[in-house]
Amino acid sequence: MNDETLRALADPGFEQYFLVSPEKLSLLFEAADIHPDDRVLEVGAGAGTVARNMPRCKSLTLVELDERLIKILREAVPQARIVQGDALRLIEEIPFDVLIGNLPNTVTESLIDLLPRLSFRTAVLAVGESANLDRLRGKYVVTEVTTITGDDFRPAQPSVSRIVKVTR
């Protein structure tokens, strides 16, 4: 999918910015440490720029709120189970070993509060530059993976974010 198409698909109302940087995707997948027998859940799958590059895994479930993107996801990632809906409401119903999240920062803040109720090995999340992750420390190991900025996304994201790894 080319840059122009991704820019046209992005809905500012959903704060949609699609991660396209090969370097940052590589760092994300390295941090996720996905094994062939893992069940992977990606929340905020968008146009599938992460899912299309996903390492081999036992199962891949993609959750996306924006109905417009469901058909695109089905075509781009035919091996995945695609679920349209609110990730914060669905996440407790879907079993997974690895969680990947690239949601708007305000939604990610709510997702972080849900993590203690979830069963997983690794979560790799895009969080706002100023996100307070102290509430996870003690129960989890939180590791900074990389910073992601405007040029890592299509369209360019106006703010700076971080990718963090969360493990028990």
Image: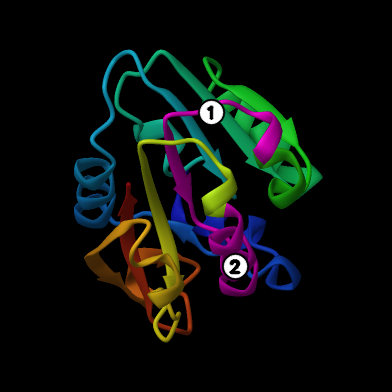
The magenta stretch spans residue 37 = no
Give percent across and percent down for residue 74.
64, 25
Q: Which residue is mark 1?
A: 76
Q: Type of residue at label 1?
A: Ala
Residue drawn where x is 70% and y is 51% of the image: 88
Identify the colour scheme used. Answer: rainbow
Relative horizontal placement of residue 85, taking residue 79 as reference (left or right): right
Give percent across and percent down for residue 103.
57, 60
Relative horizontal placement of residue 135, taking residue 73 as reference (left or right): left
Within 10 Å of disc 2 (Cα), the crowding (few <14, some 14-19, many 20+) is: some
Give percent across and percent down for residue 111.
59, 59
Residue drawn where x is 44% and y is 45% of the image: 100
Q: Which residues are magenta?
A: 92-114
Residue drawn where x is 42% and y is 29% of the image: 97
Q: Type of residue at label 2?
A: Pro
The answer to whether the residue labelled 1 contacts the one labelled 2, judged by CB atoms less than 8 Å apart, is no
C-alpha distance separating marks 1 and 2: 22 Å
Label 1 or label 2, whichever lies nearer to me, is 2
94 vs 166: above or below: above
Residue drawn where x is 64% and y is 34% of the image: 72
143 vs 66: above or below: below
Relative horizontal placement of residue 46, taking residue 122 as reference (left or right): right
Q: Which residue is mark 2?
A: 104
Give percent across and percent down for residue 112.
53, 62
- Count of numbered marks: 2
The magenta stretch spans residue 110 = yes
Of residues 18 and 61, the one drawn nearer to the viewer in this rendering: 61
Of residues 165 and 118, the one drawn nearer to the viewer in this rendering: 118
Within 10 Å of disc 1 (Cα), the crowding (few <14, some 14-19, many 20+) is: some
Mark found first going from the N terminus, 1 or 2: 1
- Secondary structure beneath label 1: helix
* Residue 47 seen in the current view: no
